[in-house]
Image: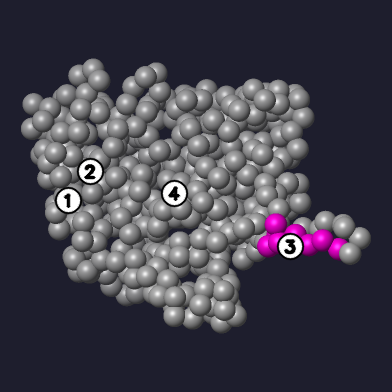
């Protein structure tokens, strides 16, 4: 097993763009909060894995051992990324699957309560599972009221709502405004009240520091295909050692359980317990390569680069009298997501389509009350020049 590499001393972002991200030669792609492009090195890692299997026989002993060692290496890198133990890493398809493992795996009783933030302002992956539970099993949904348009809430209200609750769930970074939630303070409140804490890290893992020990969460889910620049179809579910025993596995099979001669079923240890039937080895090869790529650059360096680009874009758009900005002014309280709404009614989606016609990829995202913002989500391969180009296009289109 390889050791995690040290951060390289210098990064030539221009060379990185040219060598690893061919999309940058023809398109300004700032929709990384949805799906990020995979670097060519990741694509090569997946191809190499498939070729190795084709040459050695996909179920030969040597290839089976190779595949298992790949999963071990991937878990090592994930553990390094979020500061968890190796056996607390479960491989899933997506954030949605991970969050549903919590919703479907806990023993819910009528009258149990779940605390969620902001209702429909929350991403549906971290809202609909809890709505479904409230409708199917009589679980009470306690919704934290937002104190501002960026999605923040009052910690005092949270302390009241968590009392007697079973689960508290929260996004680390909001998908629509880019606001960073106070997850460490929330984790402290959850622990003081003996409430399980689940975090949706889809918009944080790979772009800001994520430390499950500091956060104090019991569960966390995030995909490989957003800020980690990995392939689609693979993601991560973190389940703490103290929480896995109360979580019923969603599936059972030969990879996750054993059957004694007396027909007694017994689950295997973590993470196999929660990972029956996993076969996405090409995806694992790709995600491992992308994680190696991300960790070599370094999260602090990625954060700095992302914010340089985001701040240029945000400052230029904020000068326009025809838009309303979203997201905290304080840089430390937001990710690189830049969110704004044209003041003309129903024009966010139109603006996104117009930008796409000019080979600029942004996104329109719900902000609640039937409104949408335009969301730019720059990553480390985007440039400051691209931010200025986008701002000029937007200014011209809204003029």
Cα–Cα span, label 2 and label 4: 20 Å
N-term mark: 3 or 1: 1
Tell me which segment is drawn in magenta: 253-260
Q: Is residue 129 visible?
A: yes
N-term mark: 1 or 4: 1
The prevailing secondary structure element of the residues shown in magenta is loop
| Residue at x 73% of width, y 46% of height | 248
Q: Looking at the rendering, which quadrant does residue 66 occupy?
A: bottom right
CA neighbours of label 1 inside 10 A, class few (<14), some (14 to 19), many (20+): some
In x, y percent, where is residue 293? 37, 67
Of 107 and 13, nearer the camera is 107
Contact check, label 1 and label 2, Cβ < 8 Å: yes
The quadrant the N terminus occupies is bottom right
Cα–Cα span, label 3 and label 2: 44 Å
Determine the secondary structure under disc 4. loop
In x, y percent, where is residue 189? 65, 38
Determine the secondary structure under disc 1. loop
Residue behind mark 4: 204
Please tell me whether mark 1 or mark 4 is closer to you in this view: 1
Q: Residue furthest right?
A: 262
Residue behind mark 2: 361
| Residue at x 14% of width, y 54% of height | 26
Residue behind mark 1: 27
| Residue at x 54% of width, y 30% of height | 128
Residue behind mark 3: 269
């Amino acid at each position: 097993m390889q050791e995690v590499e040290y951060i390289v001393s210098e990064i030539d972002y221009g060379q990185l763009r040219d060598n690893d991200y061919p999309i940058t030669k023809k398109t300004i792609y700032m929709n990384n909060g949805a799906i990020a492009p995979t670097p060519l090195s990741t694509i090569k890692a997946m191809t190499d894995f498939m070729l190795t299997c084709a040459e050695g026989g996909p179920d030969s002993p040597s290839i089976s051992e190779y595949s298992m060692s790949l999963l071990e290496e991937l878990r090592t890198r994930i553990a390094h990324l979020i500061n968890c133990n190796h056996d607390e890493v479960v491989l899933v398809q997506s954030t949605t699957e991970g969050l549903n493992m919590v919703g479907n795996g806990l023993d819910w009783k009528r009258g149990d309560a779940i605390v969620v933030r902001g209702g429909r302002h929350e991403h549906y992956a971290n809202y609909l599972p809890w709505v479904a539970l409230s409708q199917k099993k009589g679980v009470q949904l306690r919704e934290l009221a937002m104190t501002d348009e960026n999605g923040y809430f009052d910690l005092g209200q949270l302390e009241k709502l968590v009392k007697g609750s079973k689960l508290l769930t929260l996004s680390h970074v909001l998908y629509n405004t880019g606001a960073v939630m106070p997850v460490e303070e929330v984790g402290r409140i959850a622990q003081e009240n003996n409430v399980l804490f689940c975090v949706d890290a889809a918009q944080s893992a790979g772009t800001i520091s994520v430390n499950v020990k500091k956060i104090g969460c019991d569960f966390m889910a995030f995909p490989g295909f957003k800020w980690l620049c990995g392939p689609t179809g693979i993601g991560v579910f973190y389940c703490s050692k103290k929480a896995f025993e109360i979580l019923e596995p969603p599936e059972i099979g030969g990879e996750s359980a054993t059957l004694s001669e007396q027909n007694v079923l017994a689950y295997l240890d973590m993470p196999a317990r929660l990972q029956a039937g996993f076969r996405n080895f090409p995806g694992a090869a790709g995600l491992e390569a992308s994680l190696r790529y991300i960790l070599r650059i370094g999260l602090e360096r990625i954060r700095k680069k992302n914010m340089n680009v985001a701040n240029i874009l945000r400052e230029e758009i904020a000068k326009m009298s025809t838009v309303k900005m979203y997201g905290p002014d304080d840089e430390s309280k937001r990710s690189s997501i830049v969110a704004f709404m044209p003041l003309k009614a129903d024009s966010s989606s139109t603006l996104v389509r117009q930008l796409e016609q000019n080979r600029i990829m942004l996104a329109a995202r719900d902000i609640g009350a039937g409104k949408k913002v335009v969301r730019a989500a720059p990553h480390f391969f985007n440039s400051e020049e691209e931010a200025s180009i986008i701002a000029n296009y937007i200014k011209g289109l809204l003029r």
